[in-house]
Image: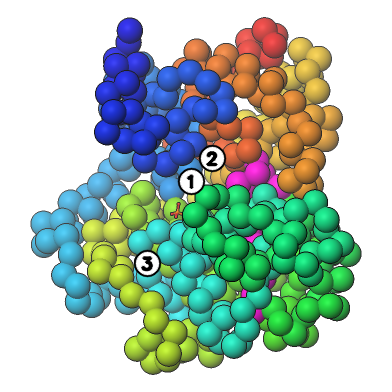
Amino acid sequence: MGKNDILFERAQKTIPGGVNSPVRAFRQVGGTPRFVAKAKGPYFWDAEGTRYIDLIMSWGPMIAGHANPEVVEAVKQAAETSFSYGAPTEGEIELAERICQLVPSIEQVRMVSSGTEATMSALRLARGHTGRDLIIKFEGCYHGHADSLLVKAGSGLLTFADSTQNAPSSGGVPQDLVKHTLVLPYNDVQALKEVFVKQGDQVAAVIIEPFAGNMNLIKPSKEFLSTLRQLTSEHGSVLIYDEVMTGFRVALGGAQSLQVITPDLTCLGKVMGGGMPMAAFGGKKEIMSKLAPLGNVYQAGTLSGNPVAVAAGLKTLEIISREGFFDCLTGQTEKLMSGFKLAADEAGVPFAVDSVGGMFGFYFANEVPTSFEAVTKTDIEAFKKFFHLMLDQGVYLAPSAYEAGFTSITHDNGVLEEIITAAKTAFKKL
Ligand SMILES: *Cc1c(COP(=O)(O)O)cnc(C)c1O
């Protein structure tokens, strides 16, 4: 038995499933999760000393590469002066100013410690602001694990106004909460219009992943987005862009800068903490000023705006703001995906790819899917085989066909070549 197996057995005794977040457990692909010992740039080494090229990068945050020397230095300096005060610091103002500058729809921002907290708080704020309870989310979008957001619709989409059609996708979520969440198919303009005709004036907020990254990578159509913005404006509903994954990852100004859409509220996380527990939500001052201590919508956090996390976030934002950063990252990610596509074509494997900035998706299907339903129809068995063939060659992909992939600025040409060579071998063996 290898060290990873030994650690996994040991972990399962004291940690449910042996992991502190479910996807890490390799349940979809099978096999033993790799226990990470250390990482540098685009690589990590597991407990057995095996080196892997990392294409998850902590699910997005490590955009500047693992253990980036500048970020490490900033964290060290911050840590020297204690880890937490529970009182405000100048660093938080700097980070808030930087965020507002990079994402102009954000006039004011509140810092929290996880993406879940950001979306949960943004929802509460939207409900407090509108005095309404109903929220709309889209099938296949993940917004963290708050009760109201762990919901998927039943199959009767035309009866979506009937709350009994909603079923929580998790145990422990009360039906009483679920009835306030409507779930619509992503990219379905008609369904969106119908629900607003029937119930538009009850909708507190619509929350969306502007590029969905939690059902593989799925892009929205222009019409879908413009309809969404128009309907929410008309009905006084708050449009929440959940950019926890896409913020500072697909472009310096996030998905909204590429889509030329101005949301009312935006949630951020992942990249903004540079790998430290840090997230935020922000938007129109008119809405944000309803938050305590100014307004009556309560939200708080002992470790919110943590100085060490702020230091990591500020340095990471500085690095990604440098000239050419996103052009380079975007180009490398496109190069990686076209390498995959070419290798699949040569082997005669039906395969499609897509990417935006430093985020990519690949699909064992003839074309790029545009909805959750289409993703579930891709060849998951082929993905599982491909995942293990790549892992055996030292390339670490997300252990699920329903996740996007992530690159960093340290994934240079040499690294890409190594990945594509492995992909060629893997496709031939499929
Ligand atoms: C990761 C993610 C979250 C949850 O963030 P956590 O920090 O894991 O709580 C929320 N929304 C989106 C779009 C995400 O990708």
| Magenta residue span | 204-218
Local packing at callout 3 (Cα closer than 10 Å; few below 14, some 14-19, many 20+) is many
Local packing at callout 2 (Cα closer than 10 Å; few below 14, some 14-19, many 20+) is many
Disc 2 marks a residue whose amino acid type is: Phe
Question: Which residue position holds label 1?
Answer: 60
Tag 2, which secondary structure?
strand
Residue at mark 3 to residue at mark 1: CA–CA distance: 18 Å
Q: Disc 2 or 3, which lies upstream in sequence?
A: 3
Which residue is more in the foreground, 105 or 409?
105
Disc 3 marks a residue whose amino acid type is: Val
Tag 1, which secondary structure?
loop
The answer as to whether callout 1 falls within 8 Å of ligand 1 is: yes
Question: Which residue position holds label 3?
Answer: 112
Which label sits on residue 406? Answer: 2
Q: Main secondary structure of the magenta part?
A: loop
Residue at mark 1 to residue at mark 2: CA–CA distance: 6 Å
